[in-house]
């Protein structure tokens, strides 16, 4: 009878270990997701008139 209790106890402990590992993985993904949202991004900005003209001239020079 003692062997059955030890086996059950080991089984319960393994279940808690699996749950803990799952919780750690989930928490890690949550931290990664929140950091990616809060990180400042280098968003596209409008070109100035001179930059736009230079880019068009480069395109036209490639087609000629």
Image: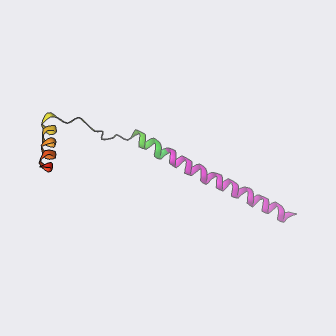
Q: Position of residue 12 (x, y in %)?
A: 74, 56
Q: In the image, is residue 13 part of the stretch drawn in magenta?
A: yes
User: What's the colour scheme?
Assistant: rainbow
Q: Residue at x 11, y 48 (%)?
A: 61
In the displayed structure, does residue 4 sit left or right of residue 41?
A: right
The answer to which quarter of the image holds residue 3 is: bottom right
Q: Position of residue 38 (x, y in %)?
A: 40, 39
Q: Residue at x 57, y 51 (%)?
A: 24
11 shown above or below 24: below
The tally of labels here is 0
Q: Position of residue 2 (x, y in %)?
A: 85, 63
Nearer-the-camera pick, 56 or 10: 56
Q: Quadrant of the N terminus?
A: bottom right
Q: Position of residue 28 (x, y in %)?
A: 51, 49
The answer to which quarter of the image holds residue 45 is: top left
Nearer-the-camera pick, 36 or 57: 57
In the displayed structure, does residue 11 sit left or right of residue 21?
A: right
In the displayed structure, does residue 55 sit left or right of residue 1?
A: left
As drawn, which residue projects farthest toward the right? 1
Magenta-drawn segment:
1-30
As drawn, which residue projects farthest toward the bottom? 3
Q: Residue at x 14, y 46 (%)?
A: 58
Q: In the image, is residue 64 part of the stretch drawn in magenta?
A: no
């Amino acid at each position: 009878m003692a062997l059955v209790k030890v086996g059950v106890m080991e089984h319960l402990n393994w279940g808690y270990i699996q749950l803990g590992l799952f919780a750690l993985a989930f928490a890690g993904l949550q931290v990664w997701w929140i950091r990616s949202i809060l990180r400042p991004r280098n968003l596209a900005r409008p070109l100035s008139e001179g930059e736009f003209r230079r880019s068009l001239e480069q395109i036209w020079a490639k087609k000629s």
